Amino acid sequence: MLYYSTKNKQHQVTLKNAVLHGMPEQGGLYLPTYIPRVDEHFIKKLKKLSFQEISFSLAKLLLGDDVPNAVLDLIITDALNFDTPLIPVSHRINTLELFHGPTLAFKDVGARFMARLMSHFISESDKKLNILVATSGDTGSAVANGFFRIPGINVFVLYPSGKISEIQEKQITTLGENITSVEVDGNFDDCQALVKQILSDEVFTEQLDITTANSINIARLIPQIFYYFRLYSQLEVHPHYLSISVPSGNFGNLTAGLLAKKMGLPVYKFIAATNVNDVFPEYLKTGVYRSRPSQTTISNAMDVGDPSNSVRISNLYKANLAKLRQDLYGASFTDDQTRKCIRKVYDTYNYICDPHGAVGFLGLEEYISKNPRIDEAVFLETAHPAKFKDVVEQEIRKDIDIPDRLNMCLKKEKISVRISKNIDTLKDVIIEKN
Ligand SMILES: *Cc1c(COP(=O)(O)O)cnc(C)c1O
């Protein structure tokens, strides 16, 4: 399968190229040149399959020409070694819990798969790869964990000193081995600027094979398609009007859902639920896409003012707003509504949402109230509530149990290299590891 750039359909590359470079040089994002469809028989027998079996069948359809079956099987078994259970919350409403991976956020799915696929592609050429990633929190921990102990790959995670939560910092800085955490005296933009500076230094990047692992890599999107099918496989009966609410920031998660539907998954409607950073819901309502600086909220992994995957969505629908509205409903919510929702869902249904999942729940509730015929509804839970302990405990008025894997990492010692915003110091850190 070839992948084309949203900026220029004629610009097509192999999967290997798309995965190792992440983004086309002239801008735009990669999408598959055709979307394979599953048959009805596959949908009917989903119930009998495990998450890994479902994922393998879909991966074969999507990547089968590019990766040998045995390798694909290994990548999936290793990357997706946790399930995504569907949990009933109320009559008609369920949640798909995507936080059972090592860093307790759904980004584990994409990061773990991408890491193993990259490792496969570089193993063919006996190269060593250095990956630089700047993070404001969650992406860094998922990427660091995803690449931990992956042969042939060194990872450098740059994060702003003192500006991420203790949990996030511990998740990045306690791994060691092939993961180097670089604590930068500055803010997130400074970290990102350092990464960009290194990547644009052609001599240095040639010499050491340096790339980045950002959220727009197609290898992160593909495995996210799998859990929408896993969702369907856990439904008791096949609903007529299945509606799925996706708490969204950069819209990668939602793009994967729309691809699942195009592959033949019977979803009636997707709900794009955001916090006050509502560029996309606004676009759905008005037809005008107006990007703007992001605002800080309690669902901070969704504080995005110009969602990168909107070009993919627009491309998949050939910019046809009417068609897009058929599949997608948009809604946005304030922090105050989100807090009240966490409280209400706990008091009424005894389920603990994290702030991102709560935004998803609100989107679903709003949509169902306007469409009473909806017979089955699911919101995605993208992070474990323990990751947002302070906000959640205030609303549910009791302590949250911290999962063992998080407790273990909180007890470990932080190891980081602290640097000023200086490109030469960063180069030294990278050279030392090679
Ligand atoms: C990244 C993230 C999101 C947003 O996902 P997108 O694919 O960027 O829309 C939502 N919730 C959590 C917890 C996240 O970490």
Image (tube, rainbow, N blue to C red):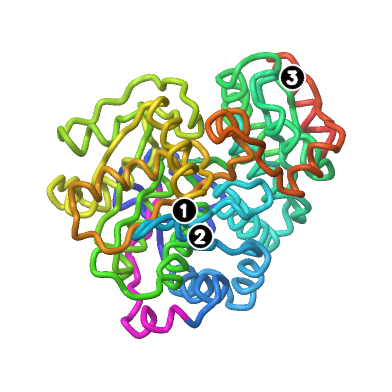
Q: Amino acid at mark 3?
A: Asp
> From the viewer's perspective, is residue 15 above or below residue 203?
below
Circle 2/circle 1 CB separation < 8 Å: yes
Rendered location of residue 93, percent (x, y): 37, 56
Find disc 2 in the rendering and name its residue.
Answer: 223
Specify the segment rendered in magenta.
30-47
Residue at the left extreme, as displayed:
322
Picture coordinates of residue 177, whole percent (x, y): 84, 44
Q: Is residue 46 above or below residue 229?
A: below
User: Local crowd at mark 3 within 10 Å, few (<14), some, or many (≥20)?
Assistant: few
* Residue kind at label 2, given as amino acid type: Pro
Q: Secondary structure at mark 3?
A: helix
Q: Quick check: is 279 in the magenta stretch?
A: no
Which disc is residue 22 wearing? none
Q: Amino acid at mark 1?
A: Leu
- From the image, tell me which residue sits under label 1: 221
Residue 424 is labelled as 3
Residue positioned 65% across, 70% down in the render: 77
- Check the image and name the residue furthest to the right: 413
User: Quadrant location of residue 160?
Assistant: top right
Quadrant for the C terminus, please: top right
Where residue 247 appears, x then y in whole percent? 41, 43
Query: Within 10 Å of the Cα at label 1, are there few (<14), some (14-19), or many (20+) other Cα atoms?
Result: many
As measured in the structure, the alpha-carbon distance from the residue carrying label 2 to the one carrying label 3 is 37 Å
